Image (tube, rainbow, N blue to C red):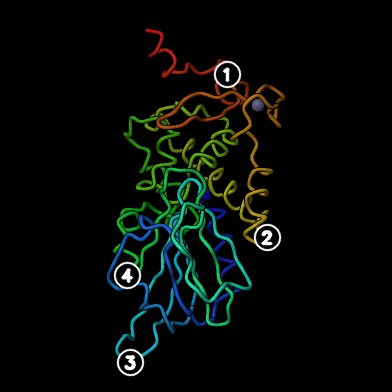
Amino acid sequence: MPELPEVESLAADLRERAVGRVIDRADIAEFSVLKTYDPPLSALHGAELKDVARHGKFLDLITTAAGANNPGALHLITHLARAGWLRWREDLPDQPPRPGKGPLAFRLRFADGAGFDLTEAGTRKRLAVYLVTDPAAVPGIASLGPDPLSPEFTAEALGRLLAGRRTQIKGVLRDQKLIAGIGNAYSDEVLHAARMSPFRLASSLNADDAAALHDVIVTTLRDAIDRSAGLVASELKKEKKAGLAVHGRTGEKCPVCGDVVREVSFADSALQYCATCQTGGKPLADRRLSRLLK
Ligand SMILES: [Zn+2]
């Protein structure tokens, strides 16, 4: 799943390629993708792309619609979900895509024939597209917590956010309503870099712990963005995977200490961690497994 660093890089890549281009048409190829109906996608015809922004893991294409009757900005917003991706294409067909069973979910075509496809692998369709006049009209954006790269996300702000919260730190880090943009992968990476157990209760962190964790969060995300800077969308996925120390690396060696990377179930998925670096050498109990054995 693309998280803050990848979406940030996608935004930068699109900004470079597409700002100033005029939109010809936007089409859905998968019915469930479009989450709004007013304004219709046809309102984008003739609109110029002014900028590309990011809200958490949401990508926001800011356009100014043509014509005196529609002077306000239109925001074409997408959330790529777990298996979605954006693919830039220099030469798209004139005709709208035919809805079908393929991975194509959405297509934006500029007047010069270039544009991009949003694709989604797998059968669980979660990719979402919104066309709104105000990004806050998207529920997932309205409820976002502070962005970890924004000035408001200070060590003190993180400390306040953790205080009294009797939930596991792993869950806090990837809760979009608490902190925007961190998902399953970068929460694993942050906790590994912070040498912290993913099951540690947020409320157990004192001000110094929170300051240290804050430092690791910002550094981890900035490093990931730096690594992907200048890469085109097609190379981002590979770069993300190569840059991860523990996430998705069950059974491999921890790059810090050489211990084996372990996996344990967490919420609706699994997390990866290093016992030597993070839990005093003691493997975490898999609750899902122990529940089944009971
Ligand atoms: Zn380790």
Q: Residue 89 occupies which quadrant of the picture?
A: bottom right
Q: Disc 1 and disc 3: Cα gap in Å?
A: 65 Å
Does the closest atom of ligand 1 sit within 8 Å of the Cβ of label 1? no
Foreground: disc 1 or disc 3 = 3
Residue contact between numbered discs 3 and 2, judged by CB atoms under 8 Å: no
Amino acid type at mark 2: Leu
Q: Kindly indicate whether the residue at mark 3 contacts the one at mark 4 (C-beta within 8 angstroms).
A: no
Q: Nearer the viewer, residue 236 or 276?
A: 236
The spot of residue 206 in percent (x, y) is 43, 34
Which image quadrant is residue 58 in? bottom left
Q: Residue furthest top?
A: 294
In this picture, residue 101 sits left or right of residue 281? left
Q: Nearer the viewer, mark 2 or mark 1?
A: 2
Seen in the picture, residue 81 relative to 41 is either above or below; the reply is above
- 1 or 3: tag closer to the N-terminus: 3
Crowdedness near tag 4: few (<14), some (14–19) or many (≥20) residues, C-alpha within 10 Å: few
Q: Residue furthest bottom?
A: 68
Give the secondary structure at mark 3: loop
For label 4, the residue is 134
Which residue matches tag 2? 231
Q: Which mark is residue 68?
A: 3
Nearer to us of marks 4 and 1 is 4
Nearest the viewer among 153 and 3 is: 3
* Element marked by disc 4: loop
Say which amino acid is labelled 3.
Answer: Ala
Callout 2 secondary element: loop
